[in-house]
Every structure is written in C-alpha cells, then in structure tokens.
Amino acid sequence: MKVPEIALVGIGGYAGTHYLYLKKFHQSGKINLSSVMVRPQDREANAKSIEDLSTIGAELFSSHEELLKKHHPDMVVLPVGIAFHKELTCLYLNAGVNVLVEKPAAGSVADVISMIEAEKKSGSFVAVGFQNMYGSDILHLKKEIVSGKYGKIRNISVSGAWQRADAYYNRNNWSGKLYASDGTAILDSPANNAFAHFINNALFLAGEKFEQTAHASAMQSELFRCRRSIESFDTCGIRLQCTGGILIQILLTHCCSKRVDPELKIELDNAVIYWSNASWKIVDRNGKTLDSGNGVDSREEMYSRLIGKLQGENEFYYTLNNAFEHTFCIEKLHENFKINELSEKEFTILRDQDNQHVIPQIEELFARAFEKNSLLFEAGAAWSKPVEWKNLD
C-alpha cells in the first residue's frame, strides 16, 4: 500500500501543531512529509523548527509554485489564515492535489461555493479541519442519535469561556478583524475561530442523517465587544433553529477570569447526552448512565482517517458541503445582528494579566443559561436586551 506524500504550508503558530502530528506519522512510516512551505519573512521566528526539517528529510520551499514545481503531494495541509483558505485551496486543487484546509472552510459563503466548484472540476477532495468530526467519540454519538433509539433531538446547548488577552489578538494581522485589506471576508470571532469547532459539533450532531450537518433556518443573536481594539465581537449568545425544529443555544466568551472548557448538552426525547473534549456520557431522564467514554485525540484520528482515504479506504471525512453550514451561520450572524459595545462600567481589564478583559461573573451567568437552554438576556444579564428572530433563508 502506497505511503501518502504530504506537504505542509507553514510551520509556526497553529501550523506548528500540525507539524508535530505529521512528524509523528512520518517517523512511524505512515506518511512521507516531503515538503514544507515557509515564507522567507517567517523563517527567523521559526528557525528551530525549520532546522528540525532536515532530520526527517522534508524539503523547505519559499513559495507554493516552487513546491509544486518539484513535488506532487497526495495531500497538502493548509493551517493558514481564514482570508487565504479559498485562494490556496483552489491553487492546490487546480494542481490535482487533495487538501486538508483548516477550519472554518472560509470566511464567506461565496468563497466556500467557489471551493466546492473547484473541487468538482479537479477530481480531488477537500477535507475541512474541524478535527472533532473525525473523532471516534463524536462519530459514535452521531450514530447513536441517528439510530433513533433515544428519540428525536429537541435542544442542544453549547457553552465555553476561554481567556484571550493581548498576545492572542496581536499574534497575527487578522485576529478580531471582519475583512482583510482586499475585502476578503474573515469574520474572526469566538464563533468563527477558537470555539468554531463546538458550534460545528452541534450542527453536525443535529443533522438528520449520519453524513449530514444541520441547516439553520432562523437565528437570534446577542453580540458584544469589550475589547476596543478589535472589529468583531468577543462575547455572544446565539440561538439557531434548524431543520426539524431543533434549537441550538450557543454561549461563548473570551472575556472571563477563568477557563471553562466547552461542553455540549444534547436533549433527546428519552436521553440527554453530555460531551466535552475530556469525556462524554448518555443518561436517561432519571439520570442513569446508559453509555459513556473518555475523550480522544481527534487530531490524531483525523490524520489516521485521511491517510486511510488517501490509500483508497472508505473513510468518513468532513466535506466542504458539511462545513458550508457553519460558514452560512457565521455570515448570517454578521448580516442580521449588530455588535454592541459594552460600557467600561460593565467589564474590567486585568493589566497584570496581559490586559485580559473580564465581564464580572460571566462564568456563573453562562452556567445558569446553559442549564436552562437560555440566551444571555433570558438568564438575567443586565447589559443584554431581548433580540428578535431573523429568518435566514
């Protein structure tokens, strides 16, 4: 069985995480990490990792064109900024290379559609790096849900609070921005970046069939900004109404004093599913545990599945058509709801913690809202106001 040849674009930042996994698979003989493209201006900051490339025999390139002139990899990995997803995906598809593009699929619906059209013409495939979608835990839960053994889904709630201070927003030139200088949509936010996985998890689990991701037909949203240096929002409450009447409530913030890792609660007719990266369980309406398990290394499982697909196996992968639904929600969010600035009386700035912005008691507010499937105004946030439903189709 042929060992797939893989190329990686970038080696610093989040690309560095991908490099560690690819290096591990390379050293085990499961792939050939043949080439890495790093722009000349990024090399000094990543000198140590670049030096490491020679130890595994990966060749370093300064441009995509230079890489493609010498190599024709089976797949390229694109952990790049949102504004470059469409451009680089189409570049490699046009060269006949399969693509793993980082989440979200792109910054706009139009860009995702362009990528889908390029994929059809190329005959190659595009997998989207929502890594939870490749995890055996999420896939097991999806099979259990679509089996119908627990009845239909009624509600899904998602909640997460991760601190993000100056270093996070200063790490690149697009964090917190809505559009690139050329007008390309970025729509960066907790919902489209750090917590995008967890919104996507809910949409996928709400899909009627195993391979489907649910489509949102209506939305309520509360969008707030504490940090004045960004264009987008840093705190939100979102409710989606999906096909089949399923409601998804989403609570996300970067303006917190302590980390509360994301969790999902899926309420069905005859059971409730609780999921986090660390563990999951299915309980009946009396609280008795029916099934449970620990979290998995979904990035490792993502690469294992994609390697299998490259070798001709019928492995599930998360497609552009699936990921379209998340991008659709994010685009409609910005089209239909304005971002409200919280007054300086409603948050504090921890100067000794890299200017971390904090909304007092936001963690407790989220916990109450998550328990009751509420939005922020329904849970008693004094700085929030009721929002109307908007039809999306």
Image (cartoon, helix red, strand yellow):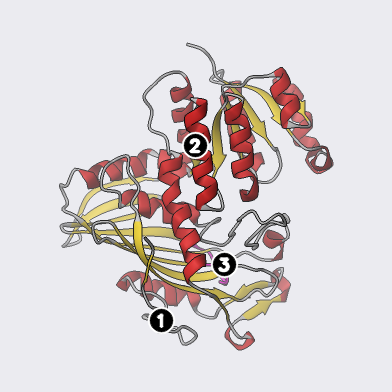
Is residue 369 something one can see in this rendering?
yes
Q: CA distance from mark 2 to mark 1?
A: 41 Å
Q: Position of residue 114 (x, y in %)?
A: 53, 42
The answer to whether residue 358 is above or below residue 252 is below
In percent of the image, x 50 and y 79: which residue is there?
361
Structural crowding at the residue carrying mark 1, measured as other residues with C-alpha within 10 Å and reported as few (<14), some (14–19) or many (≥20):
some
Task: Give the overall secondary structure of the magenta segment.
Answer: loop
Tell me the residue that label 2 is attached to.
117
* Residue 303: assigned label: none
> What amino acid is labelled 3 in the image?
His
Q: CA distance from mark 3 to mark 1?
A: 18 Å
* Residue 377: assigned label: 1
Say whether residue 72 is left or right of residue 283.
right
The answer to whether residue 166 is above or below residue 351 is above
Structural crowding at the residue carrying mark 3, measured as other residues with C-alpha within 10 Å and reported as few (<14), some (14–19) or many (≥20):
many
Q: Position of residue 228 (x, y in %)?
A: 68, 75
The answer to whether residue 358 is above or below residue 263 is below
Tell me the residue that label 3 is attached to.
254
Q: Secondary structure at mark 2?
A: helix
